[in-house]
Amino acid sequence: MDAAQRAATLTDMVTDAHSVDEGSLDSNVLRWLVSADEYYVCPQADNALQRYAAAAVLSKLVPEYEMSSGHECSWLEILCDAKSQIIGIKLSK
Amino acid sequence: MVSSTRQTLINLYLSSACSLIAGLSGELPEELSLLKHLEDISIQKGSIKGTIPPNVFKIPNLKQVDVDKNAMSGIIEVREESSVQRLDINFNKFSGSIDFLTLFPNITEAHLDNNMFNGSIPESLGDLTNLRKSNCKIIIDATISAYRF
């Protein structure tokens, strides 16, 4: 899969998810996921959509938030289970 | 005595935590509901506005929603039965009725105090047999009388 195909597949995946859940797509986060994120998530990966969603949530609640290129389960505000699925978000003073 | 390396790490951590506090704002994004395995949403002590997106309550195994001490407002809309067991929305500006509680059949704790709820106490609240801890002050029918349960 080349870069253009990857970008198109990720975009379709996020767009489809939003159409189901009535939300508006976060184009800045999608752009980060597709072109700037050094984690370079594969569109077929189990965590592709959760990575987008976690980044969108954190960037909208904490505008200065800088996304890390590590797995999203390593992000300070995120709690995952043994299957690396996000089960908690904690933001507080 | 703390080594200089360790002290540097402590300072970095404190610095990071402080920048997070300063920027906690905006509204709860719809993207929360894309996280289908979420069990715990704890976003406290910030300046979050708006209401809780209704789709959040559809997350299948969601157990806790804690948005204590923010600036959230509006009605709480729950469209179908939700798995939420603990709800803490103390110290916000939510309004409307508390009928939504009846769509949380497994709820054990409901902290609703210091909001602007009004209306009547739903009769079916008594069906929430797991509810063991709750607080809420409701203005009944917009009069000055208040009811605590």
Image: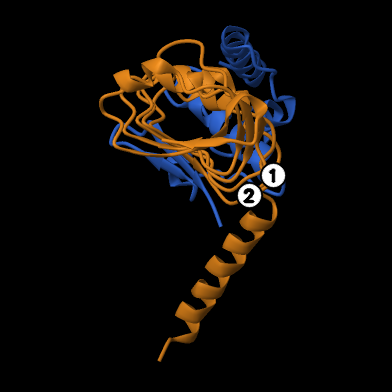
Chain colours: A blue, B orange
Are the two marked residues, 1 and 2, in contact with CB atoms closer than 8 angstroms?
yes
Residue sitting at x 53%, y 77%: B8
Residue A71 visible in image: no
The chain ID associated with circle 2 is B
Vertical placement of residue B33 versus A61, above or below? above
Please indicate whether residue B71 sits to the left or right of residue B79 in the image.
Answer: right
Q: Which mark is residue B46?
A: 2
Residue A7 visible in image: yes
Q: Which mark is residue B4?
A: none
Please indicate whether residue B92 sits to the left or right of residue B85 in the image.
Answer: right
Element at label 2: loop
> In the rendered image, which residue does mark 1 sit on?
B25
Q: Residues within 10 Å of mark 1 (few under 14, many from 20)?
A: some
Q: Earlier in the sequence, mark 1 or mark 2?
A: 1
In the image, A4 versus B19, the foreground residue is B19
Vertical placement of residue A9 versus B47, above or below? above
Residue sitting at x 58%, y 25%: B31
Where is the C terminus of chain B found, in terms of image quarters?
Answer: top left
Three-letter residue code for mark 1: Ser
In the image, B46 versus A71, the foreground residue is B46
Name the spot of residue B112 as percent of width and height, x first: 50, 37
